[in-house]
């Protein structure tokens, strides 16, 4: 009996001490994942009516010079994303475009879908085209547009971080490669273009070149001003935060109804 009493005597303080221990602090909620850095550009926020016209897949021996003539008439500059295999065949067209104030960007060597080829092939496609452009115009391109706009996340990072290219997409696409007719190409561009837009077209399709006279004239009539993509990027301004809605704003007091004067 004495043994049981002693055991109980030691058990009671231990139980009290355990009960007095502070409960473990609740786990802090995990911070939300950091969103992936946006390293592609489809359009920009600008304070003004500035847009960038871009033309892909050239230079074309016959069509690109016609487009350059038209742009010169409108005193407008554009950005040409060229294929290496076309650039090496017509370096004189690149030289003319650069001489007249247009920008030359890299669009790969032969237009494969980058998401379906190896990293080694991606680097080769970009570097061969870069060397061809540099040899033709004397300066290295700084803008890259992926064929079909298709890139994996890893490709985006090493093209931007390792190869030092701005990756340029678009927000206006008239689907001119389907050759729907010059009027439709023009109407789609005019309908979709906003300040800060990057407009996609191709200088290898005759219908696109045929659409450009009316397109340029109407864009000018709407007040748009043309810039190269690099110029547009320099004009970029921060997007203003949304205006907060007032909380518990008092309801407007209705105006008293005044009875019409019998002599009115």
Image (tube, rainbow, N blue to C red):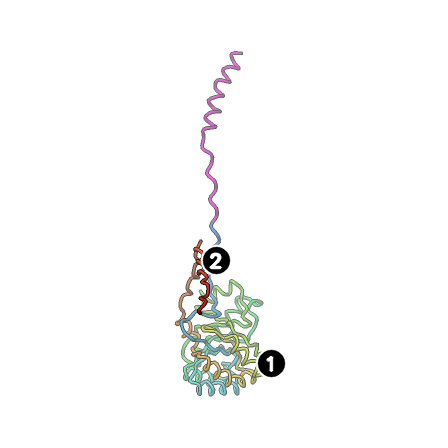
The image quadrant of residue 138 is bottom left
Would you name the residue on which mark 1 appears? 180
In front of the other: label 2 or label 1?
A: 1
Name the residue rendered at 55%, 68% in the picture.
150
Mark on residue 143? Answer: none
Q: Position of residue 20 (x, y in %)?
A: 45, 28
Magenta range is 1-30
Which image quadrant: the N terminus?
top right
On whether residue 25 falls in the magenta region, the answer is: yes
The answer to whether the residue labelled 2 contacts the one labelled 1, judged by CB atoms less than 8 Å apart, is no
- Disc 2 from disc 1: Cα separation: 39 Å
Q: Residues within 10 Å of mark 2 (few under 14, many from 20)?
A: few
Q: Nearer the viewer, residue 259 or 122?
A: 259
From the top left corner, tell me how far across and down residue 228 is, in percent.
43, 77
Is residue 56 on the magenta stretch? no
Q: What residue sits 54% from the left and 64% below the top? A: 152
Q: Position of residue 141 (x, y in %)?
A: 44, 75
Badge 2 element: loop
Residue visible at 53% across and 84% down in the picture: 209
Q: Residues within 10 Å of mark 1 (few under 14, many from 20)?
A: few
Image quadrant occupied by the C terminus: bottom left
At x 45% / y 30%, what residue is drawn?
A: 21
Which callout, 2 or 1, points at the residue further toward the start of the chain?
A: 2
Q: Which residue is mark 2?
A: 35
Q: Residue furthest top?
A: 1
């Amino acid at each position: 009996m004495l043994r049981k009493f002693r055991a109980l005597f030691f058990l009671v303080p231990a139980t009290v001490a355990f009960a007095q221990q502070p409960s473990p602090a609740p786990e802090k909620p995990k911070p939300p994942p950091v969103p992936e850095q946006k390293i592609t550009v489809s359009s920009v926020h600008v304070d003004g009516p500035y847009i960038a016209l871009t033309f892909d897949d050239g230079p074309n021996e016959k069509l690109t010079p016609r487009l350059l003539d038209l742009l010169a008439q409108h005193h407008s500059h554009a950005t040409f994303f060229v294929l290496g295999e076309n650039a090496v065949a017509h370096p004189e067209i690149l030289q003319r475009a650069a001489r007249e104030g247009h920008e030359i960007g890299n669009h790969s060597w032969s237009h494969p879908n980058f998401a379906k080829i190896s990293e080694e092939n991606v680097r080769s496609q970009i570097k061969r085209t870069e060397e061809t452009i540099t040899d033709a115009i004397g300066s290295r391109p700084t803008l890259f547009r992926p064929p079909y706009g298709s890139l994996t996340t890893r490709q985006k990072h090493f093209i931007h971080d390792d190869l030092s290219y701005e990756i340029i997409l678009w927000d206006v696409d008239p689907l001119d490669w389907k050759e729907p007719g010059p009027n439709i190409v023009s109407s789609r561009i005019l309908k979709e273009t906003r300040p800060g837009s990057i407009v996609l077209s191709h200088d290898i399709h005759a219908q696109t070149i045929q659409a450009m006279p009316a397109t340029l004239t109407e864009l000018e009539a709407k007040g748009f001003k043309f810039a190269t993509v690099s110029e547009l990027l320099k004009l970029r301004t921060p997007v203003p935060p949304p205006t907060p809605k007032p909380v518990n704003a008092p309801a407007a007091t209705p105006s008293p109804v005044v009875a019409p004067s019998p002599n009115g």
